[in-house]
Image (cartoon, rainbow, N blue to C red):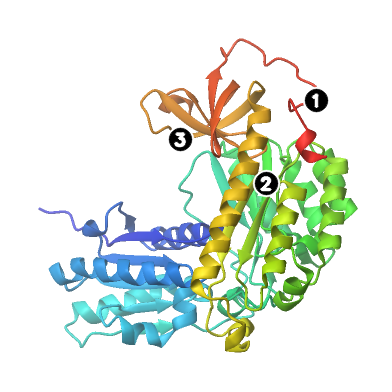
Amino acid sequence: MAVERGPRAYVETYGCQMNIADGELMEGLLMKSGYSLVRSPEDADVILVNTCAIREHAETRVLGRVGQLNYFKRLRPEVVLGVTGCMAQRMKDDLLDRAPYVDLVMGPDGYRDLPGTLGAIRSGRESGRPRRRLSVVDLRLDEDYRGLEQHRRSNVTAWVPIQRGCDHRCTFCIVPYVRGPEKNRFPLEILEEVRELAAGGITEVTLLGQTVNSYSYEHWDFTRLLRAVARVPGLQRVRFTSPHPNDFNPELIDVMAGEPTVCEHIHLPVQSGSDRVLRRMLRRYTVEKFMETVDMIRSRMPGVALSTDVIVAFPGESAEDFEQTLELMETVRFDEAFTYRYSPREGTPATRLPSHQFVDDETGQARLEELIGVTRRIQAEINETEVGGYREILVERTGRYEGTVMGRTRRNKAVVAEGTEKDIGRYISVKLTGTTGPTFQAMRLPDEQPMPFVWPPYPNLDHLR
């Protein structure tokens, strides 16, 4: 007699680390409700595409992908195809109109009801009733995600959301409109989650939030939470992303410098090097204030690696504004920069600026390419100063080539070294032998050989001065 199987689900995620965490959250909810997870959409009864809405290109790509996934619905009409996440929240019912094969549109605050909503859609199919299509896109101020468990895809590192939504209103950003206002999780629940992760063998966690260092819950601020997480037994590395420059203070830097488990890497989004553009972006800091924050960080953590986000061709950006951005990049010398050309997002204040202020595509693309060239050169120069140094890496996965593994240093530098699948999750010592762009090649040291003591901890810090 054949054994009846339960429903199968496939979740495909696009976008930022928070989206990845949300994908794991949906998988956890589905598994708890009796679904089994599959690795291919062709094997699934439910296909969910978890989406990003930050840039128009990302949405266009996702719409194309959803159209491709409709192929499996044509083969098996009972398959449920859903779009979740920020793009679903932004487009709402328009997505159902533009993609008539989509059965479910669900925003981030609807995940708690995901199994029940899918059940309502699927039960209608099984009973032969007309096809039911649902849109769940209400923003809920009371949704704090308490009690919802993620299905961890990695046994090495873990994303731990501590905050969702955002109270900032940067004029270019869609996040406050698709994720709602800032909602911070109960701190003791966060700590319990981290303790369970550490007890299960995970030694590195990353605290997630839209402006993570603005976290506040009753008598807890981010500094107190970070210190408490850093002291959880079993953890060896603690990271956080993405902070806002305005929410850095000496107390937070002291915790980072004083707690051995907190890694020497900070993602510090600057967005522009022009005060005029920063005002139009409503970033609430000046270039001078940003540089004071950089100096404060580096004075307490001289070996810290800094990464950033930069947007070019924001409406009204002049050639002089752009040159000021290039000057800031040369002055700060970020270890890594994520660069973007401004992408209008319907519903954000920047789209309502006068049309004549929008930078034409040719100029915007030229500025982006020039910025990319500058950031890559700086990154290569910084990385060259690290060649010859000794590092400890946490192995995350096997490498592209057989007999290699990829891991990261405490400063979030990617390193490829000799190893096998058995090394995943282990800390190994290496000597950096070369670099190509953002990635290092390294010689693995024998496990029994202690890593040589090097002071200063990085061969050349001239690029920080």
Q: Can you give x and y, in whole percent of width and height, for residue 274 in the image?
A: 75, 67
Q: Secondary structure at mark 3?
A: strand
Tell whether label 1 touches label 2 (CB within 8 Å): no
Q: Can you give x and y, in whole percent of width and height, for residue 3 in the image?
A: 17, 54
Distance between mark 3 and mark 2 Cα atoms: 19 Å
Q: Amino acid at mark 2?
A: Arg
Q: Can you give x and y, in whole percent of width and height, for residue 417 in the image?
A: 50, 24
Q: Residue at x 57, y 39 (%)?
A: 202
Q: Amino acid at mark 3?
A: Arg
Q: Secondary structure at mark 2?
A: strand
Q: Amino acid at mark 1?
A: Pro
Residue identified by numbered label 3: 397
Q: Kindly identify which numbered label has been placed on residue 456.
A: 1
Residue identified by numbered label 2: 239
Q: Secondary structure at mark 1?
A: loop
Q: Can you give x and y, in whole percent of width and height, for residue 251 in the image?
A: 89, 52
Counting residues from the start of the chain, the first of labels 3 and 2 encountered is: 2
Count of numbered circles in the view:
3
The quadrant the C terminus occupies is top right
Residue 235 seen anywhere in this rendered image of the structure? no
* Quadrant hosting residue 45: bottom left
Say few, some or many: other residues with alpha carbon within 10 Å of mark 1 (under 14 / 14 to 19 / 20 or more). Answer: few
Q: Residue at x 67, y 13 (%)?
A: 450
Q: Nearer the viewer, residue 99 or 158?
A: 99
